[in-house]
Amino acid sequence: MAASITEIARLANLSANTVSRALRGMPGVNAETSARVRLLADQLGYTPNRFAQGLVSKRSKLIALAITEPESYYQSAIVRRLRANLNAAGYQSMVMEIEYEDAGQQAAVLAELAGLQADGIIIGSMYGILSEMPIWEPLQQLDRRKIPFVVYGLGSSRKVNMVTIDYHRLIMEMVEYLLQKGKRDLLLFELSLIHI
């Protein structure tokens, strides 16, 4: 089992507060003491306890991702990029799958994520969030609890923080571009535009 700050403090004959400050590189600890504490921590295999740090800082450094079809090519590419960017910013991420057509399951996942005390939640839906289903109550609960969240996917009739693709504009710009290039016989292949 990895060493704790208390054990390092006992072995270094220092207070736990001094050891904690030394390990975090905070002021008030001389360089020699800091070096001794870091060496002892390395020798004992100390790793910081993120949950304990979260209790002190009131920040979990966790961003939760609630995603429909996370295994799809589109979603997996987005999730990979999100996780890489979150990691680079010092955040951990957790991915949970939500079912597009099961609002009860969506609500349960969001309630579970809210209970994790995540610093924020990213909700990703390939087809958008169903606007008239019970998903809105959990979103309102997140808002009331001051848990930041953003939805990405298709547009919605409700007012939420949302990042979306304007498919109508995208298609119009593609057609305009092809027409400007002199193309006249256009053909659109699509998998499914049922949800657009």
Image (tube, rainbow, N blue to C red):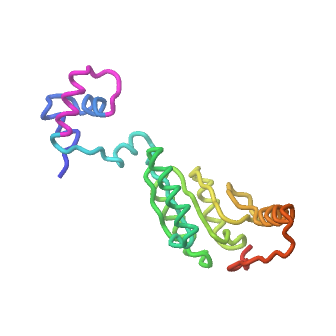
Q: Residue 113 in the image: x percent, y percent?
A: 49, 61
- Considering depth in this image, is 57 or 152 the residue closer to the camera? 152
> Looking at the image, is 125 positioned above or below residue 146?
below
* Residue displayed at 79% across by 77% down: 187
Q: Quadrant of the C terminus?
A: bottom right
Q: Residue 45 in the image: x percent, y percent?
A: 19, 45
* Residue displayed at 55% across by 56% down: 121
* Quarter of the figure with residue 13: top left
Q: How many marks?
A: 0
Q: Which residues are magenta?
A: 24-42
* Residue displayed at 52% across by 66% down: 76
Left or right: residue 86 versus residue 140 is left
- Residue 115 lies in magenta, yes or no? no
* Residue displayed at 16% across by 42% down: 44
Q: Residue 93 in the image: x percent, y percent?
A: 45, 56
* Quarter of the figure with residue 128: bottom right
> Looking at the image, is 96 positioned above or below residue 48?
below
Left or right: residue 33 versus residue 101 is left
